[in-house]
Image: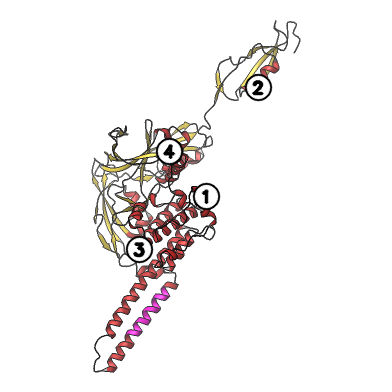
């Protein structure tokens, strides 16, 4: 996809990211493969198009939503490493994914196996659960925004940004496909929430199970109306082999009535994982029955009573096994998930190149890994960057029970042998009052410097942004720049010429220029009484709107008033 005429190819942003080639394009931004010279790592860099960056509001949304998403840290979410602007370039730096979109995968396979649908849906639900816990709604879940790696791992891309991209593409008259996955409340113009993402995931499940979209039409409007008013064809009518429970979960997720839908991603995830456990239990039963049948088919022995005892014993074992499994299922699958966890072999994630605090503090990683962190002097890498790991990424390790964890040793970069610096998280103080924000920064272990800037959206005296951004890792005691709003940027206007006008005409002139009336005084003058003879701000001067303009009115030669 490389374009030799692309002005960014070969350019180095912020003396760090060397743009190598164009790998994707959208209505809002282009995506490039880039080499990070600081970490010697390939990243994806999304750069706003010039025409988009020229729009102040779109640029503000791009920054705000990128900074929010940068706070997410989950193995099923494409990581955002950096949000920056270099000269006139607005860009974000993301994890470079070696894989294809779920849409491309569906185009190849059409209908997916139920086990594959279950696995993918669980991973997507986990991503949504994490993002929703941080207050971030994706708003545009669809196969085009879901990446599939070669090992079957799912990565959800473009939280927040995808919706902005779709808005721009739709305004440009381009078809982006989002209408096929849009929640009914979004179609009505209402603000989406976590349940809207769940609905979209339900549609994605439907498409994976059946190879078809539940609603199609000759226009986007027709499709949107069907989302609001039409019930979908049952997936099992299209593909009879779909398990009933998986169909039930899918249809509940995509229920057009928001109150009958899963209310949280955690609820959906619980049903998916419980169904997975029950399916595994069913396989265990099938295997057990096969063993018993095989035993019964052996040639008859001379001692019939021994054979009868064996059959009775086998039947008893099967009955006990059935009782235990059914009991576990009724206990909400809690123990079942521990006994029949799948897979027993877990592939070790890749941590190299990431900040160690991001890794060891991730709540999902804590469930699986026990990290041992050591440091090594390495001046070619930033402090805290993971240089190596043992076991290596991709190695399979066994997890035997719910309490067992995989021990992973991380070797991280340090600047000196006795380096005691800690990497801390910059707190989110955006839209906080100045004094409260300063207190939060100090309590988090940082120093600060204050800068001021105008803002149309942030109240005067409240925080617009920080540098580093909220959620970024920074050295303990380092300086955080706090940008405080001065309110909307002043609108300037030119002071009109008022001398020689009548008092009433001068007042009307001041008001029509979006200025305010100041003091009105009188003085003796050779001019006719009631005529303006002076103004406190000279005509032609640029002042802020609503500035008070005072005038002096002639009382006439004899001193008579107007």
* Residue 316 among those drawn in magenta: yes
The local crowd at label 2, few if under 14, some if 14 to 19, many if 20 or more residues have their Cα within 10 Å, is some
First in sequence: mark 2 or mark 1? 1
Q: Which callout, 4 or 2, points to the residue nearer the camera?
A: 2
* Residue 460 among those drawn in magenta: no
| Label 4, label 2: how far apart the Cα atoms are | 40 Å
Q: Which mark is residue 466?
A: 4
| Label 2, label 1: how far apart the Cα atoms are | 49 Å
- Is disc 1 placed on a helix, strand or loop? helix
First in sequence: mark 1 or mark 4? 1
Q: Which callout, 2 or 1, points to the residue nearer the camera?
A: 1
* Rendered residue at 33%/88% (across/down): 312
- Is disc 3 placed on a helix, strand or loop? loop
The local crowd at label 1, few if under 14, some if 14 to 19, many if 20 or more residues have their Cα within 10 Å, is some
Give whichever of 347, 190 is nearer the camera.
190
- Regarding residue 516, the answer to whether it shows in the image is no
Q: Which mark is residue 113?
A: 3
- Is disc 2 placed on a helix, strand or loop? strand
Q: Which mark is residue 439?
A: none
Q: Which residues are magenta?
A: 314-328
First in sequence: mark 1 or mark 3? 3
- 349 lies above or below 546: below
* Rendered residue at 67%/20% (across/down): 508
Q: Which mark is residue 517?
A: 2
């Amino acid at each position: 996809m490389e374009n030799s005429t692309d002005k960014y190819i070969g350019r180095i942003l912020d003396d760090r990211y060397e743009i190598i080639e164009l790998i994707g394009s959208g209505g809002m931004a282009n995506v490039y493969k880039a080499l990070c010279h600081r970490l010697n790592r390939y990243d994806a860099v999304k750069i706003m198009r010039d025409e988009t960056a020229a729009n102040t509001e779109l640029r503000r949304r791009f920054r705000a939503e990128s900074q929010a998403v940068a706070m997410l840290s989950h193995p099923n979410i494409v990581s955002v490493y950096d949000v920056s602007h270099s000269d006139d370039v607005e860009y974000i730096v993301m994890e470079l994914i070696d894989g294809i979109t779920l849409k491309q995968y569906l185009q190849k396979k059409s209908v997916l196996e139920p086990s594959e649908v279950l696995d993918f849906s669980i991973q997507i639900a986990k991503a949504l659960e994490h993002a929703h816990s941080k207050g971030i709604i994706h708003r545009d879940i669809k196969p085009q925004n879901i990446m599939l790696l070669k090992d079957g791992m799912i990565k959800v891309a473009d939280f927040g940004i995808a919706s902005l991209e779709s808005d721009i593409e739709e305004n440009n008259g381009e078809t982006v496909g989002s209408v096929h996955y849009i929640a009914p409340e979004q179609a009505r113009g209402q603000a989406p929430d976590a349940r809207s993402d769940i609905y979209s995931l339900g549609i994605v499940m439907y498409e994976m199970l059946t190879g078809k979209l539940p609603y199609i039409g000759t226009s986007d409007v027709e499709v949107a109306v069907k989302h609001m008013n039409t019930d979908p064809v049952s997936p099992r009518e299209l593909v009879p082999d779909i398990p009933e429970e998986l169909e039930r979960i899918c249809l509940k997720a995509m229920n057009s009535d928001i109150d009958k839908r899963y209310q949280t991603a955690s609820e959906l995830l619980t049903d998916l994982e419980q169904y997975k456990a029950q399916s595994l239990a069913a396989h265990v039963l099938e295997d057990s029955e096969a063993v018993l049948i095989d035993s019964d088919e052996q040639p008859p022995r001379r001692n019939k009573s021994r054979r009868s005892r064996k059959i009775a014993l086998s039947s008893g074992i099967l009955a006990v096994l059935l009782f235990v499994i059914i009991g576990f299922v009724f206990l909400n699958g809690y123990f079942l998930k521990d006994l029949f966890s799948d897979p027993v072999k877990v592939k070790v994630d890749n941590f190299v190149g990431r900040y160690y605090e991001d890794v060891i503090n991730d709540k999902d990683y804590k469930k699986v890994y026990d990290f041992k962190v050591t440091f090594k002097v390495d001046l070619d890498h930033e402090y805290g960057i993971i240089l190596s790991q043992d076991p290596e990424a991709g190695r399979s390790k066994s997890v035997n029970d719910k309490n067992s964890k995989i021990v992973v040793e991380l070797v991280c970069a340090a600047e000196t042998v006795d380096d005691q610096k800690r990497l801390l998280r910059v707190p989110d103080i955006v839209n906080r009052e100045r004094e409260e924000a300063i207190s939060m920064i100090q309590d988090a272990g940082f120093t600060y410097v204050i800068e001021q800037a105008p803002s149309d959206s942030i109240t005067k005296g409240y925080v617009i942004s920080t540098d580093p951004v909220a959620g970024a890792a920074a050295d303990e005691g380092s300086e955080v720049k706090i940008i405080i709003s001065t309110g909307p940027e002043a609108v300037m206007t030119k002071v009109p010429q008022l001398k020689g006008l009548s008092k009433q005409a001068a007042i009307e002139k001041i008001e029509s220029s979006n200025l305010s009336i100041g003091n009105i005084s009188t003085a003796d003058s050779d001019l006719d009484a009631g005529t303006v003879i002076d103004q406190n701000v000279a005509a032609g001067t640029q002042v802020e709107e609503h500035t008070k303009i005072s005038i002096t009115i002639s009382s006439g030669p004899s001193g008579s008033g107007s």
